[in-house]
Amino acid sequence: MLRSLVYVIVLQLVLQITDAMFLPLSFALPTASDAPSSSSSSSSSPGFVDFTFTLEPQDMVTVRGGVLQLDCQAQSDAAAAPPSIMWRKDGVLLSTVVDERRRQLENGTLMVQNVVHSRHHRPDEGEYQCLATLDGLGSIVSRTAKVTVAGSHRPVYFMPSWTPFRETCSRRT
């Protein structure tokens, strides 16, 4: 019985986390002034804050050794300072400190220099998301951008087999 109860609680938590991961691209967040107070009149509307992406990452195809650029910008009418931007790749937060090829520009754009791609090592290929956060207000998550790395172009040569039909038939007779 206890095991079933724990299972149900864990399942509910997973569903709540999953729902939170798929927030709409733009939504209004309630502010502290939305809390009910005894002096507020019933005719006043609650105060909401608009927090939206003005630029989101797009699906990209890049080449090995090239430069990858993913753009992200968000804005809110509640804060004078711009939101802080962080990046996720395949669901894991990226650190620009760990990999010197990656850097985040002041406007939120993620730059990856010298894109790496081999048969068994594809650290730059995957699904990227941008997270915009305003302190005291909340966070929003961008659309998922799929990054594909194409290998270098090598010419493909077609080498026909030079065994003419006549020659093959004439040898048999």
Image: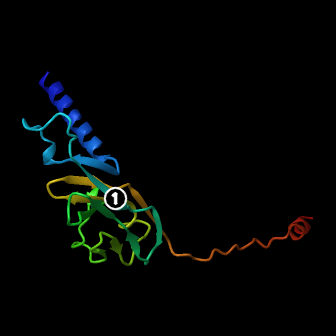
- Vertically, is 139 above or below 57? above
Task: Classify mark 1: helix, strand or loop.
Answer: strand
Instruction: Point out the residue furthest to the top here.
Output: 1
Q: Quadrant of the N terminus?
A: top left
| Residue in the image at 20% along x and 66% along y | 81
Which of these two is toward me, 117 or 89?
Answer: 89
Give the x, y percent position of residue 136: 14, 54
Q: Is residue 163 left or right of residue 70?
A: right
Colouring mode (rainbow / by chain / secondary structure / one colour): rainbow
User: Which residue is found at the position 70% from the left and 73% from the top?
Assistant: 158
Q: Residue at x 20, y 35 (%)?
A: 43
Q: State the count of labels.
A: 1
Residue type at numbered disc 1: Phe
Q: Which residue is mark 1?
A: 53
* Residue plotted at (88% across, 71% down): 167
Where residue 139 appears, as percent x and y from the top left, is: 23, 54
Q: Residues within 10 Å of mark 1 (few under 14, many from 20)?
A: many
**Which picture quadrant has residue 122?**
bottom left
> Residue 3, image x and y in percent?
15, 27
Question: Which residue is nearer to you in this view: 157 or 79?
Answer: 79
Quarter of the view holding residue 37: top left
Left of 149 or right of it: where is 13?
left
Residue 69 in picture, x, y percent from top left: 39, 72
Q: Classify residue 121 by image quadrant.
A: bottom left
Front residue of this view, candidates 31 and 140: 31
